[in-house]
Image (cartoon, helix red, strand yellow):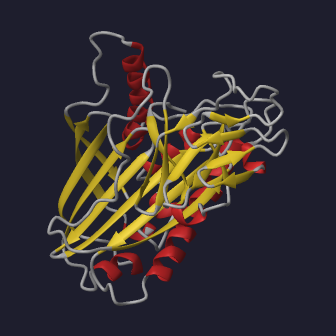
Amino acid sequence: MLEGFWYIATQSRHVRFDRPTAVALLNQPIVLLRDRSRAVYALEDRCAHRGVPLSAGWQEDDSIRCRYHGWRFAASGECLEVPALANGTVPKSACVRSYPVREQDGWVWVYIGNDRCLQPTAPPPALPAPPDGSRMVSTRVSVPVKVRMDFAVDSLVDPAHVPFVHNRFFRQQHVAKLKEKEFTRLPLGFRTVSNNVKFPNTFVFRALTPGLALARTTVDFLLPGIHLETLEVGKRFGSIMLIATPLTTEVTRLDITVGWNFLRWAPLAWVVRLTARTTLSQDREILELQEQGNLQKTTMNVGLEHDTMAVWYRRLQKYHLDQLAGVPNLAHPVPEKTTLRWTT
C-alpha cells in the first residue's frame, strides 16, 4: 500500500452533517465530518487522550467531541477543549492528524501522505470527459473484496481474464481474436490508444453503439491502482474510472464510476449500476478464490506477455518508493513505447 496518493474514502452521499462517518484507508482509521457549509473534513479516528474512536462521539458544528472525556477537536485536528482541565489551558500536543479532502465525481477523496509528501501536488484523478465539452450523466458502485491490494490491481490491468470471468458482458470466449496494443509511458503509469476498434457483439457495447460502429478507445493505468478508460463512437462518449482502494492489508474495495453523454433522458443509470455491480461481483468471486489459493504458496507464473502490465505495476511501486526516498538516476520501469499481443 502506497502513501503519497489520493484515495476514495466513500461516496459523497454517505457523509452527512451531524453524522460522523468512520472509514478505513491503508489500515488507518479515519472519521469524516461535513459541516453546515457542506465542506467535508477528515481526521484520525482516534482521540489523542485514551484512543477512543472519535466517530463514536458526536459532532458540534465543525468540531467533534469524544464520548469518553469530552475532548473536542476542530476540523483542523486541533484540540479545542478538555473539560476536566482545572486551568482550561489545552496542551498543544493534544491534537489529532488531519487529512486533505476533495469531493469529486460523487466521491470523497482523502490524501494519505507521509513525511516526504505531506500535501498533494495535484488533484485526485477525474472521470474522463468528452472532448467537445458535452454534458455527461454518471453513476457509481463500490464492492468490497477480501483480497490484498496487489491482486486487485492485477485484475485492473489483466486483459486475459475478461472472456472467462466476464463472459457475454465485454468479451465472448468463442469469438476470441488476436489483439496488438501499443503502450506508451506515463509518469507513474502507462497508456494504450486504439483506433477503428470493432466491439464484441454484447449488450454492453450495443448500448454504446447499436450498430457496433468502429470506435476509438483510450486506456490509462496510474498508480496506486487507477484504471481510466474512454470509448468514442462519433459524438457518443463513454468513460470508466475503476479504482482499487486499499482499506486494510486484507480488504480492498473496487470503486467504479461510469459516465456517458448520450441517451441522457433515458433511465439508464439503474441498468449501468446493475451491470457494474454484477461485473465487480464477478471480480470479487475470482479474486477471493485467488487469495484462497495463495494462503500457503505465493509463487505465481507471470512471465507471459499478457502479464507484462502486472509486472510493470510492481516495478512502478518500487520506482515511486525510490523517488520518495530520493534515490538518484532512476530509470522508469515502463518502456517509452512498446507493443504487446494477446488473444481475447
Of residue 274 and residue 291, the one placed in the foreground of this image is 274
Residue 259 versus residue 322 in the image, above or below: below
Farthest top residue in view: 328
Query: Looking at the image, which residue is at 68% across and 49% down?
Result: 146
Task: Give the image location of residue 336, x and y in percent.
Answer: 19, 32
Q: Which quarter shows the N terminus?
A: top right
* x and y percentages locating residue 292 in the rendered image: 72, 44
**Residue at the spot x=38%, y=33% of the render?**
312
Location of residue 99 in the rendering, given as x and y in whole percent from the top left corner: 52, 38
Residue 321 drawn above or below residue 24: above
**Picture coordinates of residue 136 (x, y %)?**
30, 73
Residue at 29 percent of width and 59 percent of height? 128
- Is residue 94 at all visible to an observer of this figure? yes
In front of the other: 176 or 278:
278
Query: Left or right: 101 with respect to 278?
Result: left
Work out whether residue 157 can be spotted. no
Side (left or right) of 144 relative to 226: right
Which residue is the extreme one toward the front? 87
- Looking at the image, residue 62 sits to the left or right of residue 5; the answer is right
